[in-house]
Image (spheres, grey):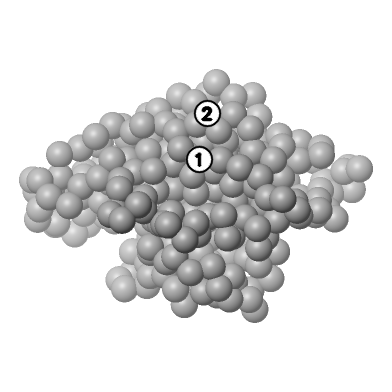
Amino acid sequence: MREGSPPNPAPPAPHGSLTLVSVNMHNETRSDVFLGGLEGHPPLRQADVYLLQEFVQDGADFLGELSRALGYHYAFGSTQECGDGCDLGLAILSRYPLRDFRVLPLPRNDLQYNQRCRIALAADVVTPSQQWALFNLHLDTRINAGRRVRQLGPILEAARSSSSPAVIAGDFNTADFLWIRSFLPLPWLQLHKRAVRKALESEGFSTPFRKTGPTFNRFPLKLDWIYLKGLRPIRFGLTRLNFTDHKALWATLEEEGRSPADSP
């Protein structure tokens, strides 16, 4: 686990809303590639919070480089070592301070091969006028819908204990396959997206991405989501980036019952 603040923090954004981006980094480790890939996409380049999956923290201190370049606070949780002093995991970068940072271990599944520890990275983002609970996740691939919902359990339990508006986002790996022994996929025989949505809706979460397109570039799969509780999207969308095989999801959010005019 790692967290920290930049030597020169970015100033508060001149609005009452908050723009959040979630993207699977596909193991990219070059800060110039990441930041350059965001150029030309204002909602992404000017975002207040980044929730990043498949983030490699290596000896070159990729996370520290991004923190200094953006002036953003950061948190990182490792899921596995990837050799030569590097770790693969989840990261949060935030314009605003992060508090109550913690790693939530998720249920382990025996996938026969190519498996890893799964976690969620949780933190509270504290702006001058509000506090929101953030949950960044990356769920297993070759599991069936029941196990996928169970893997969400620790996240939903933590969200229940918070009175703040909440965001659950990341790579849910919701490909609609029935898996035979975590090896053979049978398409369309299980609806993972529906199972996950029902579980989250039962806890008061909703998503504006229900009718948007695929988030995976290689195949028409919808794997990534942003779910909200106590928040409403002002704008949202998907953006294809040149360094990852996943599209970035972004949303500009405000608290329900609140408008930018209400902010100081």
Q: Mark 2 or mark 1, which is nearer to you?
A: 1
89 left or right, relative to 192: right
Q: Above or below — where is 77 with respect to 37? A: above
- First reached walking from the N terminus: tag 2 or tag 1: 1
User: What residue does disc 1 label?
Assistant: 2
Q: CA distance from mark 2 to mark 1?
A: 22 Å
Residue 65 appears in which quarter of the rendering? bottom right
Of the pair 105 and 249, the residue shown nearer to us: 105
Task: Tell me residue 240's x, y (percent).
Answer: 49, 73
Residue 188 visible in the displayed image: yes
Residue 36 appears in which quarter of the rendering? bottom right
User: What residue does disc 2 label?
Assistant: 159
User: Mark 2 packing: few (<14 Cα in 10 Å), some, or many (20+)?
Assistant: many
**Residue type beneath disc 1:** Arg
Q: Residue furthest top?
A: 161
251 left or right, relative to 225: right
